[in-house]
Image: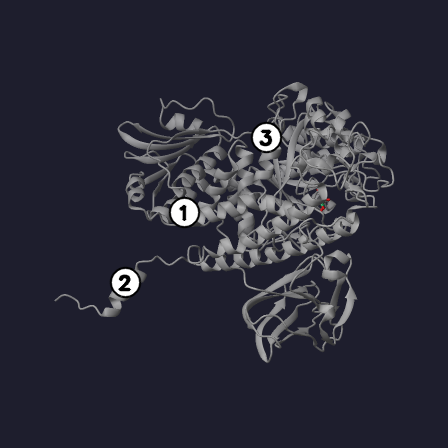
Amino acid sequence: MRPVRSRLFWILLPLLSIVPIQAETGYDAWLRYPPVTEGVLIDAYGRLPATIVKLDNSPTLTSAQNEIVRGVRGMLGRTLRMESRPVQGGMILLGTFAAVKQALPGTALAADLITDGYWLKATVTGGRHVLLITAPNDRGVLYGAFALLRHIALHERIDQLDEKSNPYAPLRWVNQWDNLDGSIERGYAGRSIFFEDNHVLADLTRAADYARLLASIGINGCTINNVNANPRVLTPEFLPQLARIAAAFRPWGVELSISVDLGSPKTIGGLNTFDPLDPLVAAWWKQRVEEIYRIIPDFGGFVLKADSEGRVGPSTYGRTHADAANVLAAALKPHGGIVVYRGFVYNHHLDWRNLKNDRARAAYDNFHDLDGKFAANAAVQIKYGPIDFQVREPVSPLFGGLKHTNETIELQITQEYTGQQRHLCYLVPMWKQVLDFDLRVNGGDTPVKQIVAGKTFHRPLGGFVGVANVGRDLTWLGYDLAMANLYGFGRLAWNPNLAARQITEEWTRMTFNDDPRVIGTIVHLEMESWKVYEGYTGPLGLGTLTDILHGHYGPNIESAERNGWGQWIRADHKGIGMDRTLATGTGYIGQYPPEVARQYESLETCPDHLLLFMHHVPYTHVLHSGKTVIQYVYDSHYDAAEEAQQFPRWWQALQGRVDEQRYRAVLDKLDYQAGHAIVWRDAVSTWFLRESGIADAKGRAGHFPGRVEAESMRLDGYTVEDVTPSEDASRGKAAGCNTAPKNCTASYTYRGKSGWHDIDVQYFDANTGVARFELFVGKQLVQSWAADAGLPSNIPNGDTSTRKRIAGIELQPGDEIRIIGEPNGGDNASLDYIEIKEPAP
Ligand code: GCV
């Protein structure tokens, strides 16, 4: 009998056929391996051999084999048979060149592969289909395995694979800035996955999973502790703990390295000196290094920050950076280890009154004369720009200034000055510009990527280092969309010639899905985000106009001025910008090779986006774009903040197209960013209006239609307070509730037009407690929320200023809008203003 189906069944049928999108935490990042559902692809991938053979038992090859089994099971729903010897039928064959040669004599191997490079080759030998994944070394085979899985995840053909891929540079590292107590310097995603309470964590599952992520993008080294290093890391009690992390990394081909403190021979070694030229000091390092290699044979080496930001260094004994690097290098050399010496050396007590002083000069001035003096197993690690990871900087001239010294470039995946993983700011487009920048050393074609990879000056060592701050948050970086930076860094370190858009598309498809709308929206968001962030934080080469003395997060323009840190923008009533010219300024521009120097020296040829980094000009200076500097500043802030308002709207189009959990989490972040972009816009525009005295030609700066200041509302319990810096609050003031545990109330009688409105409540979310707010219209409670974002300050300012949007409220003249603030801990439920607007179309 045919089953009888109810009407309801037929109504529900279309819904039943929709595969529900599973909630996801983000933990799997781009290694999710979701099922391939397209019929054509299922057929094509169905021809994949059913057996996977690994030719030796090394931990790395075992990872490669397991990973392919895992990926194929996830994506193709098949469980491959695992073997350790070639079989009669078809197979996926994993092995180094040496092993393949033995197992399949006569197989012609790709001679042009270098260490870590891999070859994927679909072939027929002895009548059987073999998908060969081979490489000169184990790690290369693992990278090949990930490459194969990437092809499948991207739904690319694999039946005729013949892909050889070499890494662009030997050194592809991340530096974590984790402290042994479990905190992370500039960490925005929870505590360390390595340390707690001055010990290595007992459970290193996260460390191993991190290594897997790193391996999947070709990263071969991880420095696990802060460059502001705790000497304890080298103590005999600590080394065995480090060995456990190395063991967690090893199956993924990630070498462990550590940051060390140059003062260690004295602080923990019992010597009365740490003079790098003292034989006792050299012997101490040698002995420590031997001890390390005894328990960690594949140890990568040391990273050293010295004579910088309060760290001790060779200057204590009148020695050079090369002396300091070389004493470590000598100890590491017999074991194949390297030392990476940070070029981030500058005086943070510069006299700001001296117009010739310039922090940007520091790296070149400190290292250029030492060119050729560093050991062959040492490299100088240079931040991409001469200041410190700003939203925009010119490339460091030091890249072109060391021809006989190994270099690495330091990029920052951690968004220290670029929104701290609360703002979307995708840095791959910026890194591409930096890496492609042609320094024209000796008038030749010398892009930064080639120099740091050792290609230009034929150096044996070199590469790419990304400062990363993954933490215990399940999303790793605290924000799903920020993971594109980690992915992009790895892909560029492997091949800096990849296009930013291609990298972003790959990442999006693997992290989310293949829906063209999803791909289009996310790629667009990511690709726009750096330009937008720069636009509302610090355009024209000013750098991020943030609070450089504290959190490096919200706006605080003047924190850059009149102190020894040297991030000056030299703004006064008449003009702005650092004069770094040779003719009249600090001479910094002279550190570049002549062609580049000529371009920057002249106002005619200096690009607008670096103008104020290189020149001091009046606010009325006309840019190449035809706008004056001051009008550009206003326009840039208004336009970029407006674009940030679109981010959550674009994202909303993806509801139901990405899993609900990540959809919500990302939407919250983009909403927050849209609000904070307004804080930035207002702070910077207000400050420039006040400083320059020149009005915004479009009449926006200083005018806030629909805004009701908290200080002008009826206040019960709330008291009016000044905010510092004043531009971080609307009209410079806030209302704080200092009556804890009693609540405070701010109310206002609406007199505008009746109809639907959005109400924005601007409040300050201090990190010392969790205040709560309730918003009433008349007697009706419309919204309540907690101020629990964990922002980087404990007072009302640009770090803590936060917007809560309450959309779609019907208001009528005479309605009372009332906010009740409930203080908690040190969070005084401070209010800045409310803004009542007609809803955006
Ligand atoms: C690890 C900047 C950061 C510091 C960091 C330093 C460095 O100054 O703010 O947190 O210290 O750079 O790179 O050494």
Task: Pick whichever, 277 or 838, lies toward us.
Answer: 838
Query: Is the distance from the Cβ of mark 1 to the nearest ligand 1 atom less than 8 Å?
Result: no
Residue 474 lies, with reference to residue 363, above or below; the image says below
Question: Which residue in the protein does label 1 denote?
Answer: 516
Residue plotted at (33% across, 36% down): 91
Amino acid on which the number 1 mark rests in the picture: Pro
Residue 166 locus on image (x, y percent): 50, 29
Tell me which label, 2 or 1, sits earlier in the chain. Answer: 2
Residue 820 lies, with reference to residue 469, above or below; the image says below
Q: Which mark identifies residue 835?
A: none
Tell me which label, 2 or 3, sits earlier in the chain. Answer: 2
Residue 212 lies, with reference to residue 320, above or below; the image says below
Gap between marks 2 and 1 measured at Cα: 25 Å
Question: Which residue in the protein does label 2 denote?
Answer: 13
Task: Pick whichever, 459 or 396, lies toward us.
Answer: 396
Q: Quadrant of residue 825?
A: bottom right
Gap between marks 1 and 3 measured at Cα: 30 Å
Tell me which label, 1 or 3, sits earlier in the chain. Answer: 3
Ligand number 1: quarter of image: top right
Question: Which residue in the protein does label 3 denote?
Answer: 436
Amino acid on which the number 2 mark rests in the picture: Leu
Is residue 802 in sight in this rendering?
yes
Is residue 211 in sight in this rendering?
no
